[in-house]
Image (cartoon, helix red, strand yellow):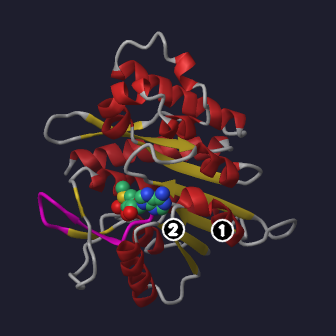
Amino acid sequence: MSKFDPIIDVEEDGLLTPTVRRWSEEKYSLLGSYANIFTTSMCKKWNQLVYLDLFAGAGYARIKSTNRLVMSSSLIALSLPVPFTKYILCEENKEKFDALKTRVSRDFPAADVTLIHGDVNKKVWEVKRSIPRYGKGNTLLSFSFVDPFSLNLDFNTIKVLGSRMNMDFLILLALGMDANRNFKSYLLNNSSKVAKFIDDDFWTKKTENLINSSDFMRFLSSTYDDNMLKLGYKEAADKQIVRSHVKNLSLYHLAFYSKHDLGNQFWNDMRKYTDKQISLF
Ligand SMILES: C[S@@+](CC[C@H](N)C(=O)[O-])C[C@H]1O[C@@H](n2cnc3c(N)ncnc32)[C@H](O)[C@@H]1O
């Protein structure tokens, strides 16, 4: 496999650069390492390899505690030693979208990139239509990184993209950051955000026995896995729990889903390797 360090330092360029917390480095490391195994191992077996970033960001991020300036998800994926053949990047915030667009065209002018501005839950069919055609003799494998701030990710978005496609997903489930903090109000208000997240309008009927927010997080996580099984995905691989460095609180779970055993094997191998790297931080 090609050697690749996903934490890539960059110079200040005057464009919008969101500030992120230190634990984002763990996310970037896992994303970049998985994407590297994916393209290196699959480039000879498939004609087209497609990367989708549904909550793409601005391309650069500043780590708050260290002030370090690094590439964020989409640009990490564009920097792989063996690149994807096609990139589809969606970002809702106009300023971040513009910064991303400028950075992509300046730094990766030769890459085949479709940039989509807007709410991915509404633009999902535009995203799907941007995936190149494939068929017999022209095979296509895709990998989608899904990195929302909260539970604001409709399961329908995953369903539209994952149905009848060879698409691996790495999804940030904002269980600690959102589900845990807002547990009571979501239950009280029969939250439609939660209903959309797990594709179940009657979800509160299944939560009557839940005692606390930890039960709620477990319920969301296992319901998500069941939903993915119904789409034809394998039994979920172990999720990576990303914790805050300060209080060691669980912030989010990175969940990996593939329709192929090899995908889960790559994810598990890569987690062991990345755990060692992360413990060096
Ligand atoms: C947690 S940040 C992740 C950014 C990036 N993936 C990274 O590596 O740092 C989530 C991003 O998604 C964008 N966003 C939020 N809701 C969105 C939506 N419904 N559709 C598309 N983008 C959205 C936000 O503006 C933000 O840039």
Q: Quadrant of residue 112?
A: bottom right
Name the element at disc 2.
loop
Q: Is residue 40 visible?
A: no
Q: Quadrant of residue 33?
A: bottom left
Say which mark, if any, is on residue 144: none
In this picture, is 12 found above or below 219?
A: below
Residue 57 in the image: state x and y as whole percent. 39, 66
Q: Main secondary structure of the magenta part?
A: loop
The residue tagged 1 is: 126
Residue 152 in the image: state x and y as whole percent. 46, 47
Q: Residue at coordinates 30% horizontally, 64% vertically from top-left? A: 7
Count every numbered label the image shows and give the total: 2
Residue 248 in the image: state x and y as whole percent. 20, 34
Q: Which residue type does callout 2 highlight?
A: Gly
Label 2 close to label 1 by CB (< 8 Å): yes
Q: Which residue type does callout 1 highlight?
A: Glu
- Split into quadrants, the picture shows ligand 1 in the one at bottom left
User: In this picture, which residue range is highlighted in magenta?
Assistant: 56-68
Name the element at disc 1.
helix
In this picture, is 215 found above or below 74?
A: above
Say which mark, if any, is on residue 118: 2
Q: Is residue 182 magenta?
A: no
Q: Report, in whole angstroms, how far the alpha carbon at label 2 lies from the one at label 1.
A: 10 Å
Q: Residue at coordinates 71% horizontally, 40% vertically from top-left? A: 231
- 246 horizontally vs 94: left or right: left
